[in-house]
Image: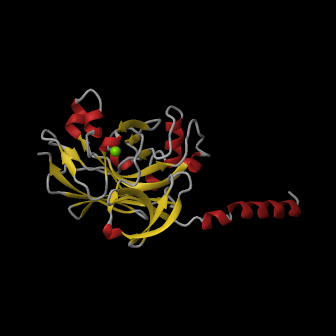
Amino acid sequence: MPIKSRLLLLALVVAMSWPSQDAHAQLPVHYVRYASGATTSYGILEGETIRELQGDLFEGPRPTGKRLRLADVRLLPPVAPGKVIAVGLNYKSHLGERPSAAYPGLFAKLPTSIIAHGEDIVLPPDANNAHYEGEMVIVIGRRASRVSEGDAASYIFGITAGNDVSERDWQKNDLQWFRAKAADTFGPLGPVIVTGLPYDDLLLQTRLNGEVVQSQRTKDLIFNVSEIVSYVSRYVTLMPGDVIYSGTPGTTKPIKPGDVVEVEVEGVGVLRNRVVRQK
Ligand code: MG
């Protein structure tokens, strides 16, 4: 190849790999949903202050100008999803001896499974083998049907932390995973949705009563975020606010009344829930 062509090619490669202006422009934004008195609102969390928003979170909400102290509101799950989808067996460290699948293994939780940061995981009287599953959770930002892996990122609003609470005996013995995964309170979510994070490589940690029991980077996901969203959208139309639990790493342990489970996703913060027994 003539030297001139080589130089041109080199310049092209450098230009293409150079971070674009957009990559730097999108700083992380922390969105919360909260109750203040009788009002439920979305807001942007900045330190200990919330800037109230009006309008749909996924349609360019506007600040009202009102500011509240985080300490003065009750945090709600950061979104009220229409659908709660989850991927199973998506980290090699969780597979153990099992072979990895050729495609993402999907199952469903329910909107009624979802609880906020600070709310209690309530174990039904006959749930004797419920486990924590710390996970990064994808929040969909716009209607997605049959989107390619290459386009998937533009359908993602942001990410949050989740706990895919799973009753192992029910998971093993029931006809389906429905009860094991979708019981009330089995889907802690939050505390914030963060946009603009590099979700393909974030640290995910779970702590049980302060002890680190799961720790893995999201780059170790077998099917990454874009692959998951594209795959789900081949079969199910994703809508703004739908959430997808992306899978749990390592091993899990049973949780019992009195335990405190914390799931921390780098850049998102800590999702903390206490475990109680249903009365
Ligand atoms: Mg899971």
Vertical placement of 127 versus 3: above or below? above
Find residue 146 and report its horizontal and vertical position in percent: 58, 35
On the question of residue 196 being in view, the answer is no
Q: Residue furthest top?
A: 175
Vertical placement of 171 versus 81: above or below? above
Ligand 1 shows up in which quadrant of the image? top left
Where, by quadrant of the figure, is residue 97 drawn?
Answer: top left
The residue shown at (44%, 53%) is: 220
On the question of residue 235 being in view, the answer is yes
Where, by quadrant of the figure, is residue 43 drawn?
Answer: bottom left
- Residue 66 or residue 48, whichever sits in front: 66
Find residue 71 and report its horizontal and vertical position in percent: 31, 70
Find residue 237 and report its horizontal and vertical position in percent: 51, 35
Where, by quadrant of the figure, is residue 49 drawn?
Answer: bottom left
Count of numbered badges drawn on the protein: 0
- Residue 75 or residue 100, whichever sits in front: 75
- Residue 46 or residue 63, whichever sits in front: 63
Find residue 10 and report its horizontal and vertical position in percent: 77, 63
Vertical placement of 74 versus 122: above or below? below
The residue shown at (12%, 41%) is: 125
Position of residue 43 in the picture relative to residue 165 (left or right): right
